[in-house]
């Protein structure tokens, strides 16, 4: 039973570029949430996808967008990268039932130069 | 807006002693409170969670207590071991499933 997977593990981009991060949920899960974790901080909620639609969104600008596919996998896109976007990006999957446990993937470390 | 405060930011405990981490939350609609452990360079791992219909939950050396009236909850680790050294995050979620995390507590277990 595969857990949550993410790709790539590391990524280096320059300011102004665009990036796409990918997440495959744990088997049996249909909901994917994305978080940004800056160094020394707790994860910050970006948004959540369920049934291919954005269900919840945190306080992140429109440069952050996402998508969920029919197989429940998800992408996080960030446009016009800023230095401050450098962080560990985590996705977490859950069953879609309210208050269900979220399980995290290993994360993608994004460095913006 | 929603907010979760966590204290202390750093905690050093002698091996074998107990460690307590405390959190408060602002959204009275919160009713799910998970705790995650994150080791250096690794993903957050759920260690215990509690839902608002109970006041206390225990799993071996780990326990969590919840006081909904005061809007605070705590993590208790007894008989601490070296492998308990990590960063611990409390979090709170309401029915919308948006989880708000605290800033974390770095726990050091001293030999």
Image (spheres, coloured by chain):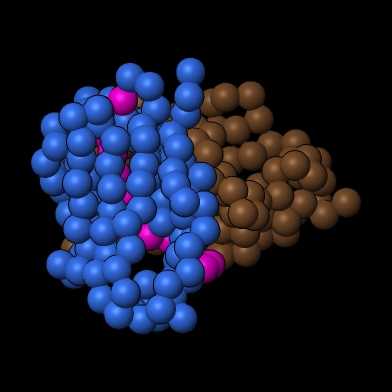
Chain colours: A blue, B brown
The residue depicted at 28 percent of the width and 53 percent of the height is A76
In this picture, is B16 found above or below A77? Answer: above
The answer to whether residue A90 shows anywhere in this view is yes
Percent x, y of residue A77: 26, 59
Q: Is residue A106 above or below residue B9?
A: above
Q: Position of residue A100 (x, y in %)?
A: 30, 28
A35 falls in the magenta region? yes
* Residue located 56% across and 58% down the image: B105
Query: Residue B84 sits in which quadrant?
Result: top right
Would you place residue B109 above or below residue A111 in this image?
above
In the image, taking residue B22 as reference, residue A53 lies left or right, namely: left
Q: Quick check: B52 above or below A60?
A: above
Q: Residue at x 47, y 29 (%)?
A: A3
* Horizontal side, residue A59 vs residue B92: left or right: left
Please provide percent x and percent y for residue B40.
Answer: 64, 55
Residue B79: which quarter of the image?
A: top right
Residue pictured at 32% horizontal, 31% vertical: A94
Range shown magenta: A29-41
| Magenta-span inclusion, residue A34 | yes
In this view, the residue in front, A6 or A13, is A13
Measured as percent of width and height from the top left, residue B7 is found at 51, 61
Left or right: residue B104 versus residue A54 is right
């Amino acid at each position: 039973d595969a857990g949550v997977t993410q790709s790539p593990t590391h990524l280096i981009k320059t300011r102004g570029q665009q990036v796409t991060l990918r997440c495959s949920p744990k088997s049996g899960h249909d909901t994917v949430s994305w978080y940004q974790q800056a160094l020394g901080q707790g994860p910050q909620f970006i948004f959540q996808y369920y049934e291919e639609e954005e269900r919840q969104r945190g306080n992140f600008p429109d440069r952050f967008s996402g998508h969920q596919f029919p197989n429940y996998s998800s992408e996080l896109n960030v446009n016009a990268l800023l230095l401050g976007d450098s962080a560990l990006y985590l996705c977490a999957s859950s069953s879609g039932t309210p208050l269900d446990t979220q399980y995290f993937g290993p994360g993608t470390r994004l460095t913006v130069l | 807006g929603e907010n979760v405060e966590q204290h202390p930011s750093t905690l050093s405990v002698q091996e074998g002693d107990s460690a307590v981490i405390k959190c408060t939350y602002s959204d009275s609609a919160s009713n799910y409170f998970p705790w995650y452990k994150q080791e250096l360079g690794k993903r957050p791992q759920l260690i215990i969670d509690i839902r608002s219909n109970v006041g206390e939950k225990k799993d071996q050396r780990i326990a969590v207590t919840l006081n909904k009236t005061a809007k605070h909850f705590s993590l208790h680790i007894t008989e601490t071991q070296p492998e308990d050294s990590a960063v611990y995050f409390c979090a709170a979620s309401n029915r919308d499933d948006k989880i708000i995390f605290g800033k974390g507590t770095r726990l050091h277990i001293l030999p």
